[in-house]
Image (cartoon, rainbow, N blue to C red):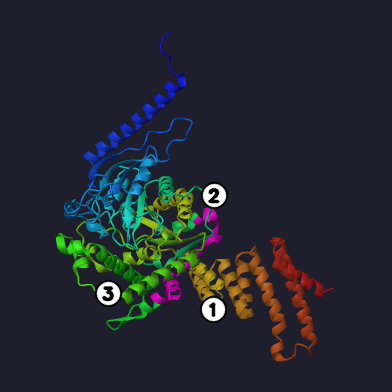
Amino acid sequence: MGPPQPANHVWVILGLGFAGIFLITAKLKKKKKSVNNNNFGAFIHNLQLLPPPPPPPPKAPLPLSPLTFALSDLFDIDGHVATFGHPEWARTHEAASQTCPVVSALVEGGATCIGTTVVDELAFGLSGENKHYGTPTNPALPARVPGGSSSGAAVAVAANLVDFALGVDTVGGVRVPAGFCGILGFRPSYGAVSHVGSITVSKSLDTIGWFARDPNILRLVGHILMQVPYIFQRNPRQIIIADDCFQQLNVPLDRSSQLVIKSAEKLFGRQVLKHINLEDYLSSSVPTLKELSSLKTNGELKVSSLKSLANVMQFLQRHEFRLVHEEWINTVKPDLHPAVSADLYEKFEVSDVEVEHFKSIRNEMRAAVRSLLKNEGILVIPTGADPPPKLGGKEISSKDYWSHAFSLLSIASISGCCQVTIPLGIYEKCPVSVSLIARHGNDCFLLDTLQTMYSTLQEQVDIAAKSKSPRNVVTKEEAAEIAKERGNQAYKDKQWQKAIGFYSEAIKLSSDNATYYSNRAQAYLELGSYLQAESDCTKAISLDKKNVKAYFRRGRAREMLGYYTDAIDGRIFHSVQTCVRQVSACYYISLYFQYALVLEPTNKMASSAAERLRKLFQ
């Protein structure tokens, strides 16, 4: 008898194992070839951090297999010296003795790391420029900057060189390049992902973020890095549009916020939508920030809460960076980009009182966002205010340009909330994006919401892009809808007169919409202005014979007018004619309520009112 032969299933398992290794190696060679030949200037070093062998069937494959990824060059890799965006840093530091936990988790999850990528000098800028290693080429717009600080990581994903990439987001280092390059970018909640093994920029602002083209991959990476199990997916109960932020954009609303609104209506219904003036909300909800905004600078009042918030963010970034790296900068005196040099070498003194003051703002900001969004709310803002600057353009050194950007970026950076950047196609040859924000710690909910909304959002993007008459300004109908939503919000807040003003604005813009008149009538009823309410309801009914609410509200207005009209003359209890008139009015009002019930049989308010009037005639 010869030696024992292995069972057939053993050969099958070995064959599958070798096939898996072959596929990973082939894909890696293909990626390596593209990295070497046309990497868009994204990479600094090539690496091959290979995952463990795939488990044999019937066990499930590793969750990230066979994905590839890249790293911004500020993470520890065993035996590798991170450049931190500057050759002097690499020259003056030793190689890492171990690989940082987040990278190890991704590799152990089945992903293959193929290289490290360019960052801004000391990861301190937002343009993506780097004169030492070269500025990576923006695949979406080669004549414009890719955005930073994690520029190379964003470019590697946008150019399809890797499936996902890691970066660091301090004041926008993932969100800005994601927006500029037209890909997805995620900034997790502060502290949700371990910072261990990455070079610190600003201790209280740094987050480990990541890029992807596919929302499923973005979500999958999030679950690996945050070490959370998959749970039942929840839909948002509130989607809050920050109207004042979108009004500052150079992109029309039908190519930005309206795409989110239409997608939300289609998926979740109009009832989830809410409009807000974020500037006003922060002024009333973050008292320490309000104090800062009211301080005079050169005799002029600072009126913008968001700009004050941006100043706090930049202050903390500079202060905390210097605490960690000032000794190295003063010793080595590295050659820096003028913008970075101005921030780091400029005389900068700060008291402990000021630092505590800014920490108070951070705590209040997190509480304010939590109160606004609660467990299942989403805030919608633009990712950035302006298109990417041209390479070498004056905007790169413009304080006004970055002031607008920082105002939006500071919301998540200071509150510590999670934020995802979503591409919305191209407008006037520049990428457009929007951002969704969820409260601190609600990262999985935000990634789930992105996955739910993404395909519908892209459908709306395609519809808007194919429109035969692209608009540079919002239409009257859209403006009227915005005014109506603001009126609805004012009504919910019991600001009746303010609600009437918004509804009146909507009527001026679109005078043939029955809902606007009916809503204004309801606000008039709250103020006791029954004649105006009755008139608005009559107009609404003439425009839409099936407007149930208008019938109900007119019935209520006429019921009240029947009681009050003659009371003014002091004859309500003395005139038989008045009594007859009141009885007649009540009879006709009861008909209105009955007609409302025909249109809407389950209307409890109309049913109750009709029953009360029916008893009067018994």
Q: Are marks 1 and 3 in contact (CB under 8 Å)?
A: no
Residue 232 image label: 2
- Look at the image and tell me whether residue 118 can be seen: yes
Q: Residue at x 26, y 38 (%)?
A: 34
130 or 72, which is in the foreground?
72
* Amino acid of disc 1: Gln
Q: CA distance from mark 3 to mark 2?
A: 47 Å
For residue 518, above or below residue 196: below
329 or 346, which is in the foreground?
329
Q: CA distance from mark 1 to mark 3?
A: 46 Å
40 or 328, which is in the foreground?
328
Could you tell me residue 389's position as x and y percent?
25, 59
Hey, which residue is sitting farthest right in the picture? Answer: 618
Going from N to C along the chain, the mark reached first, 1 or 2, is 2
Which of the 4 quarters of the picture holds residue 493? bottom right
Going from N to C along the chain, the mark reached first, 3 or 2, is 2
Q: Which quadrant: the N terminus?
A: top left
Mark 1 element type = helix
Could you tell me residue 61's position as x and y percent?
44, 35
Nearer mark to the viewer, of 3 and 2: 3
**Residue wearing tag 3:** 350
The magenta stretch is 264-289
Mark 2 element type = loop
